[in-house]
Each structure stands twice: as C-alpha cells, then as structure tokens.
Amino acid sequence: MFVRNPLNEDIYRLLNEIADLLDLQNASPFRIRAYRNAAKEIAGMSGDLRSLAIKKNIRKLESLPGIGSSIGNIIIDYYSNGSSRYLNRLRGEVSFEQILEHIPGIGPALARRIMRTLNIDTMEELEQAAYDGRLAKVPGFGRARLHLVQMAMKGYLDRKKQLNTWQSSLDFSRRPDSPGIQILLEIDEKYRELARDNQLKKIAPKRFNPENKAWLPIWHTERKGWHFTILFSNTLRAHQLKKEYDWVIIYYQKEDIEGQVTVVTETKGPLKGKRVVRGWEEESEKYYSLPLLLESQSD
C-alpha cells in the first residue's frame, strides 16, 4: 500500500516558502514553478528524504522527480544545519513593506503609510486591521480599495493555512471550492472584450503609474452566486514582459469562500495561444480537450 511520508513535511513547507518569497521578488516564473513542483512531488513520496540528506547522497536526491542539483543541495543544507541558509537569505531580502506593496490596491507610498500609521509587521495583523476599521482610516483607503485588499489578503492567508496543514495539502487531486474553470475563462474573455471596447470604469493604480493616469479597467460581476472583481495585472513582472494587457487577475468570493487566479495566454506546449488559468494547467488542458473528445466520439 502506498503511504505518503509525514517526515517530508518540513521540506514541503520549506520549498513552498522559498517559492512564495521568490514570487514576491519577481523572480523567474520558471524558478518559482520548479520549487512548487518539487514540493508537490515530495508531498507524494513514500521515502524519507532526511536519510538521504544526512548521508549527503546528492545523486540519489537528484534522481527523484522534481528535484535537481539546486533543490537537492537545499535539502541537504536544511538537514545538515537545522535551517536553510538560502531561505534565511531570502527572508532577509524581503521586508514586510515589500510584501504590502504586492497586495493589489497597495503601492509603495500607501505601504509606507500603513506601516507608519498602524505599526504592524504581519499579514495576520493587517487582516485584523482591515476588519476592525483601522485600515479604513489610513489616508488613501476608500470602500472599493479596502474590499480589494481584504479579498487579496484572504486568498493569501487561506493558501498559507492550507500549506501549514500537511494532511489537507496532500490531496492534490481535489481543487479547493471555486467557481470552476469554465466560468473563470468565460469571465476572462468578457472582461477583455469590455476593456477592448472601452466599456469599463478605469482606475489609476499607484504602482508603475508616475503620471497618475486612470488606465486600469476594473469590472465587478456576479455569476451563479459568486462575486467577481477583475482587472489586468499591474505587477512589475507583467510590465517587464509587456503582459499588462494580457495577464488578467480574477478575485472571486461566495459567502466565506474567497480566492484569486491569474489567466494568461499560454506561450508554449499543446495549449499555446489559448487562455489558461495559471496553476490550473491540467484543468485547462481538460477544458480545451473536451470539445475535441466529444467531436471524436460523434464520428
């Protein structure tokens, strides 16, 4: 009988935290994905990585799915020293102010104002301030921005809680409750159509907008009991790759369920040129292959 090894839990969390910090630093999506894929593979392994790491058996580690030389050495370092020097360095390079800047609706100036006004240094404290009224009193916050920040924080903290719950994190076949890929892709298509036809309200984001120009289309809509807030990505990476009018961020909410996804145009592989939900590649492939399957079955 196949049994996942709980002794690998520390490495699973370690690699996911590294991926989170790299994401905050706008590192290459390929590097970020490599750490997340390795964590996913490790969560399903029955063998004990610790025994290999203590023996410094890098060749054996490298041969495991998703683990190459770099990640193998990180695992060895963690078990040899009791902590990861690479993770500690990444932690030192990311301040809480930088984390705030990456929350949709908050830019550098507003992040500094929040730090100065509220004197907080964790996402949990920020969440509390968002719901007890303190964040709303920070100059620059209106109802719409406050709601956007609340939704973004909820998605971040929910994901963090899931990663800290080892048993629930192992069930990768189960997608957390969400509107479903069909609705997400339909909303993405409609949003880009409305934006192209200049039918949406535009806001002036604080980040990467020195002229304070209202250029970012925002759309609120309801589908099957879900509330959606949709806008183009205004991240540094999106601007660097000139994808600010391609990457679409969708925030969704229903009762006590909230989350967010990014929809992009795939640039390689069998789905090249198609709109896919980032992180949902398997679901995206099934979504696009279904019409072909039904067509083949009718022949």
Image (tube, rainbow, N blue to C red):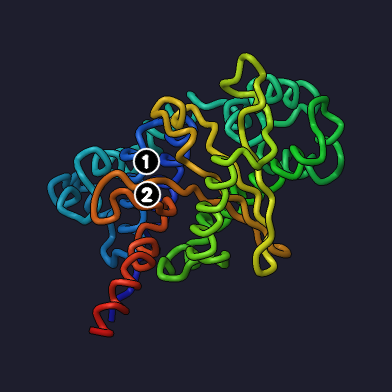
Quick one: which residue is furthest to the front in this view?
Answer: 197
Q: Quadrant of residue 74?
A: top left
Nearest the viewer among 197 and 93 is 197
Q: Position of residue 93 (x, y in %)?
A: 48, 24
Give the residue pinned by disc 1: 32
Asked if residue 134 is positioned above or below residue 54 in the image, the reply reads above
At 38% from the left and 37% from the top, the residue drawn is: 84
Give the residue pinned by disc 2: 36
Q: Please give left or right for residue 183 compared with residue 150 in the image.
A: left
The N terminus - image quarter: bottom left
Q: Position of residue 273 (x, y in %)?
A: 32, 48
Asked if residue 260 is positioned above or below residue 126 in the image, the reply reads below
Q: Please give left or right for residue 30 compared with residue 100 in the image.
A: left
The C terminus - image quarter: bottom left
User: How far apart, in angstroms, are the residues tagged by discs 1 and 2?
Assistant: 6 Å
Nearest the viewer among 277 and 197 is 197
Q: Please give left or right for residue 181 compared with residue 86 in the image.
A: right
The label on residue 113 is none
At 69% from the left and 60% from the top, the residue drawn is: 222
| CB under 8 Å between discs 1 and 2 | yes
Quick one: which residue is furthest to the bottom in this view?
Answer: 298
The residue type indicated by label 2 comes to Arg
Q: Count every numbered label the image shows and give the total.
A: 2
The residue type indicated by label 1 comes to Ile
Tell me the element at label 2: helix
At 65% from the left and 64% from the top, the residue drawn is: 223
Q: Position of residue 289 (x, y in %)?
A: 31, 68
Q: Please give left or right for residue 267 compared with residue 164 in the image.
A: left
Q: Position of residue 164 (x, y in %)?
A: 53, 55
